[in-house]
Amino acid sequence: MQNSTGLNWDDYRVFLAVADNGSLSGAARQLKVTHSTVFRRIAAMEGRLGLLLFDRQPSGYRLTLAGEEVVEHARRMETESEAITAKLSGGDLKLSGTIRVATMEGLAMVFLPPFIKRFRQLHPEIRVDMVISSQVFNLTRKEADVAIRMGRTEPPEHLTGRRIGTVSWAVYGSPGYFEEHGKPTCVEQLKGHQFVGADSHEIHRAYAKWTRSVVDEDDIVYTSNVVMAQRSAAREGIGLVVLPHYLGETERRLEKAFEVGPELDLDMWVLTHPDLHNKRVDALMDFISESVQQIEPGLSPEADS
């Protein structure tokens, strides 16, 4: 099916593959075509539209403003195409296909993989595409099928899902750091200790505010806008760090100093949009919810041996 520009769904499918992978080679692998085929299709698409859809950068292909406009329409076409195919083939009833899950870095790298592994053992025909971003993905615009989020407020009413647990926090340090500087057992004993914290871009977050409320600014000796980098710095003995249990308890080279009170607790939610419900999405949401609730309180799953 073509539109007035002469483009068809296959053109948009190639465009989305490049947008998702950020490179021609990644798109070619996903589509199982050659690199040159993807290059020609994108060049032809830009020529027909009279628009530059991607900035060609050394790090990869990045959407231009025009490309971001086009990707919204292409996502809708993709969803409608999948819905039609599912209804005609009964695919919506099968536990197969792809689920796009959006979440933040720490959850994607440490917390979720053991659950995804067990889920795929039960449903080997389901592929999970994990999208890592600190930004909130828009489920209404179908940027993802499922989002796993943390926060203090309830999600928007137009989303469906459930609260699956509470994320608790503690102060951690390396054994070497404790051996050299001692192990504090409460907030009052933090004075004089070196600390790893969030950088200026992240100081709006509750854990960053807490750190600066109990530690002198001069004692914060290392900062990063990425919590995984903060975890790594503390692991190397640079200083103490406040982390959620799922990051602190799963790092063998960190020891817990003491628990932080409930003022830092965050709710964890698994969410989708009503239009995105199908059997595989519901199966994943149910599995994640049931699995996570088995490890409450504090969300600190055991590390793999």
Image (spheres, rainbow, N blue to C red):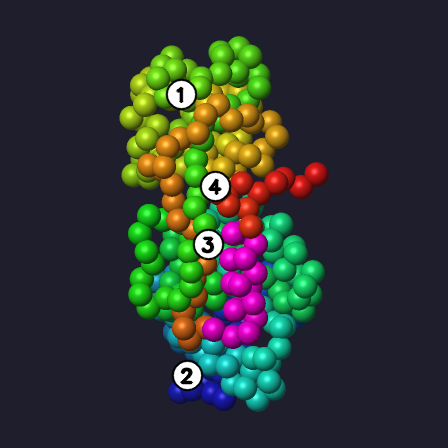
Evaluate if marks 4 and 2 touch, with contact meaning CB atoms under 8 Å apart: no
Q: What are the residue bounds of the magenta stretch?
A: 277-293
Q: Which residue is mark 1?
A: 186
Q: Amino acid at mark 4?
A: Gly
Q: Residues within 10 Å of mark 1 (few under 14, many from 20)?
A: few
Mark 2 against mark 3, which lies toward the viewer? Answer: 3
Q: Main secondary structure of the magenta part?
A: helix
> Quick one: label 4 or label 2, which is nearer the N terminus?
2
Question: In the rendered structure, does residue 289 fall within the stretch colored magenta?
Answer: yes
In the image, what residue occupies the spot 45% across and 58% down?
270
SS label for mark 4: loop
Q: Which residue is mark 3?
A: 164
Alpha-carbon distance for marks 1 and 3? Answer: 29 Å
Q: Which image quarter holds the C terminus?
A: top right
Q: Which residue is mark 2?
A: 5
SS label for mark 1: loop
In the image, what residue occupies the spot 60% across and 27% down?
253
Q: Amino acid at mark 2?
A: Thr
Alpha-carbon distance for marks 4 and 1? Answer: 19 Å
Q: Which disc number belongs to residue 298?
A: 4
Alpha-carbon distance for marks 2 and 3? Answer: 46 Å
